[in-house]
Amino acid sequence: MTSTERELLLKDLAESRERLLGLVQGPSREQRQYRPAPGRWSVGEIVEHLATVEDRILGLVEDALKAAPDTTKRSALEDQALLADVSGRITRFQAPEFLLPTGKWEGDELWQQFEAARKRTREFAAATDADLRRYFRAHPVFGELDCYQWLRMLAAHCDRHRVQGEEVKASAGFPRAASAR
């Protein structure tokens, strides 16, 4: 990865984290667990999903680096098209079962798990010497992506679900603080 790519990736990861922090700071247990409709996720479930996906994708990237680089391939999508699709929620799809939230973390632990996962991703991105553009993994919706795109997608995925969480908080039935009633 070039120094420009590294800088952009680290910036995306930091900024998406900050935007998500604005969503998750201070909600009560009732607010974290509120679902606006059956089958929709709560803010807590969104954060759990983000932490789970972050760990999973970093693991996929690390596994991909165990193989030889492939200089003959190119990603199925250009970076900006991929990131715009993911963050803009253009292509919608159901998360696979193993990435669905299960309620395994509660309260402060939700954010701590996300923070730990994001920290590992940032440390990896800051330290790797691998040419991530030469290592590939197939995405079930977007096709063959290079590992740099997989990592950039984490920030876009975070923004995608932050918007979803903002919709949950804006829904009519969301439990408001007593003073706001």
Image (cartoon, rainbow, N blue to C red):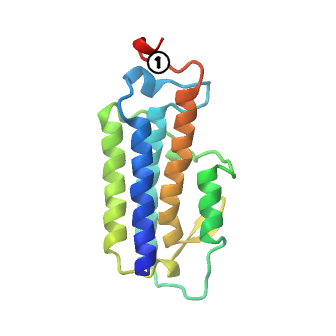
Q: Is residue 22 left or right of residue 142?
A: left
Is residue 108 visible in the rendered structure shown here? yes
Whether 158 is drawn above or below 140: the answer is above
Whether 140 is drawn above or below 8: the answer is above
Query: Which one is in front, 151 or 18?
Result: 18
Picture quarter with the N terminus: bottom left
Q: Position of residue 114 (x, y in %)?
A: 37, 47
Whether 108 is drawn above or below 180: the answer is below
Q: Residue furthest bottom?
A: 71
Q: Residue at x 61, y 30 (%)?
A: 39
Q: Residue furthest front?
A: 180
Whether 162 is drawn above or below 36: the answer is below
Q: Position of residue 60 (x, y in %)?
A: 46, 65
Q: Is residue 149 left or right of residue 112?
A: right
Query: Which one is in front, 55 or 90?
Result: 90
Labels in figure, total = 1
Q: Residue at x 47, y 18 (%)?
A: 176
- Secondary structure, mark 1, is loop
- Mark 1 Cα within 10 Å, few/some/many (few <14, many 20+)? some
Task: Give the quarter of the image for residue 125.
Answer: bottom left
Q: Position of residue 47 (x, y in %)?
A: 44, 41
Q: Residue at x 65, y 57 (%)?
A: 85
Q: Position of residue 79 (x, y in %)?
A: 59, 69
The amino acid on which the numbered mark 1 sits, given as a three-letter code, is Arg
In this figure, which residue is indicated by the disc labeled 1?
Answer: 176
Q: Is residue 176 left or right of residue 80?
A: left
Q: Residue furthest right?
A: 91
Q: Residue at x 47, y 33 (%)?
A: 43
Is residue 140 visible in the rendered structure shown here? no
